Each structure stands twice: as C-alpha cells, then as structure tokens.
Amino acid sequence: MSGVDGKVVAITGASSGIGAATAIELADRGAAVVLGARRGERLASLVERIRGTGGRAEMLEVDVTRREDLAELVGLAVDRFGRLDVLVSNAGIASLAPVADLEVDAWDAMIDVNVRGVLYGIAAAMPVFRAQERGHFVTTVSTSGLKIVPTQAVYAGTKNAVRTVLEALRQESTDGVVRTTAISPGYVRTELVDNVADPDQREAARQAMAELGIDPEAVARAVAFAIEQPEDVEIGELVIRPARQG
Ligand code: NDP
C-alpha cells in the first residue's frame, strides 16, 4: 500500500510540537492516527480537532519509559483499526549542559525517554509488523547527532544510539517486511527546550529556536513523505534544517 490514505499510524509525543503537527498532517491525508503522550488533555483536544474535520483518531495517555504503555498503544491501534502500519516514535526530551556539570539525573531521563522509549516501541510493534508481514518504524532523531556541539553531548548521544539501532534494523530486514526511517530535524519551534534546567542554556536555546527555527509542520511533511512511498522504497533518513542553520 503506498500513500498515506488508509494507513494506521501510532505517534508518540503527539501532545505538542512535531508529534501534534504530524498527527494533523497524516490525519488530513487520510491516515487513522493513534496518539500517545502523558498530557491527556492535549491529546483529547487534538483528537477532537481531527475528528471535527472528518478524520480518524484515538488517544492514550502513555509514558514511553513504561514498556507496558507502548504495548497498550500498539494494542489500541490494532483493536480500533485492525492493524498498525507505522509507528512514529517521536517522544523526546532535551537537557542542555556541559558534561562537566554532571547533570546525571538529566542524563538518565534522556536515556529513558529518547532511547528506552524508542526500543520499547520497537518491542511492542515488531510482533505486529512481522505478523502482518509489513511495518514501518519512523523515529525522530536530530541534527545534533550529526554535528556535535557543546552542551548537547548526552542528548546527541541518545539520538545517535537510536540512529544506530534503526540502521541495524534496516540491515536485518532485507526481506522487506520492516522499513525504518530516521527523521532528523534541526531547529524547530516547539516546547522542547522549555524544561531545560539551566536558565542561561534555556534562554539561549529559546532564542535560537525563535530566530532560526522552522515550523513543526515542515517536519510533519517529511514524515508524510517517508510514509507515502511505495512498499519497495525505504527512506533511510531525512534531514530537515532551517536554511540558515549552520
Ligand atoms: P515538544 O516538547 O513539543 O514535544 C515532545 C513530546 O514528547 C511531547 O508530546 C511530550 O508529551 C512527549 N514526551 C516527553 N516525555 C515523554 C514520556 N516520558 N512519555 C511520553 N511522551 C513524552 O518538542 P518537539 O516536538 O520538538 O520534540 C519532538 C521530537 O523532536 C523529540 O524527540 C525531539 O528530541 C526531536 N527534535 C526536536 C528538535 C527541535 O528543535 N524542536 C530538533 C531535533 C529533534 P508529554 O509531555 O505530554 O508526555
């Protein structure tokens, strides 16, 4: 099946930013979307908005650090829509600080959400994809894993860990059953840096996003492009940066 229309897509981190924009983009193109994040009220209003324009959407409060939550999200897609075609593992957090600041709790949190959260999604969806003999893992990584800059060491490391897993999965899936796509955004105007602990780092990141950042809809269109390809075409990685980002 090519195109987006009719596909069943589960999206983590769908309550704001890139995930929410992706949900709207894919639903507008005819996908049934199953939305997961912790902030249920945000998800509920997104579901209402999508259904209000004739789209199909379900939601579940999900914490991606809990393996069973991912299993429930995948189960919801299968229960309501009969299958799962794509899992967009998009939930992520960023903490910006020099390594020497030893923000060990923040390191743990990023590893839990950005790495374990993605692996738990793979664990939940893989049996469904194998049974269907078709499935697509789309995962939001980052240009910070391509161009390493100070203060982003652990964040970039989590994104590169996931990039590595996706590439291995691609090589292990030469039967064509499972496709993988890494979506690699540069600065995008979202809430991502709102929780950065250090006020100076937070302000610097907010300013960079405000000055340079592109809209999350630009990334959503890239996700749609990866998903709409014919089954024999796999988009390995898409990099979507502001044209003025160095
Ligand atoms: P947002 O902060 O707007 O979105 C992050 C999403 O992740 C939210 O929906 C949040 O939902 C969800 N999330 C965070 N922790 C958890 C958790 N434990 N369980 C479930 N969901 C969780 O930022 P973005 O849209 O920018 O971020 C989306 C992805 O894009 C992230 O992976 C980020 O690393 C990546 N990215 C962003 C860039 C940018 O410049 N904005 C650049 C490169 C990559 P909730 O809090 O409701 O759980």
Image: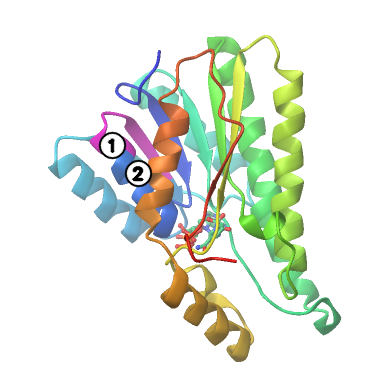
Residue 212 point in image, percent of width and height: 46, 71
CA distance separating discs 2 and 1 = 6 Å
- Amino acid bearing label 2: Ala
Q: Along the horizontal axis of the image, is 90 left or right of 19?
A: right
Callout 2 touching callout 1 (CB < 8 Å): yes
Mark 2: give few (<14), some (14-19) or many (20+) Cα within 10 Å: many
Q: Secondary structure at mark 1?
A: helix
Q: Along the horizontal axis of the image, is 44 left or right of 138?
A: left
Determine if the magenta segment contains residue 29. yes
Q: Residue furthest right?
A: 100
Q: Could you tell me which quadrant the C terminus lies in? A: bottom right
Q: Secondary structure at mark 2?
A: helix
Of 66 and 200, the residue lying toward us: 200
Q: Residue at x 71, y 13 (%)?
A: 174
Determine if the magenta segment contains residue 131. no
Q: Is residue 75 visible?
A: no
Q: Residue at x 45, y 22 (%)?
A: 229
Q: Along the horizontal axis of the image, is 150 left or right of 60?
A: right
Segment tinted magenta in the rendering: 26-35
Q: Along the horizontal axis of the image, is 136 left or right of 19?
A: right
Q: Examine the rendered structure and indicate whether residue 138 appears above or below residue 170.
A: below
Which label belongs to residue 27? 1
- Amino acid bearing label 1: Ala
Residue 81 point in image, percent of width and height: 35, 23
**Corner quadrant of residue 107:** bottom right
Q: Is residue 188 visible?
A: yes
Q: Residue at x 61, y 29 (%)?
A: 180
Mark 1: give few (<14), some (14-19) or many (20+) Cα within 10 Å: many
Which label belongs to residue 184? none
Residue 98 point in image, percent of width and height: 78, 79
Label 1 C-beta lies within 8 Å of the nearest ligand 1 atom: no
Q: Which residue is mark 2?
A: 23
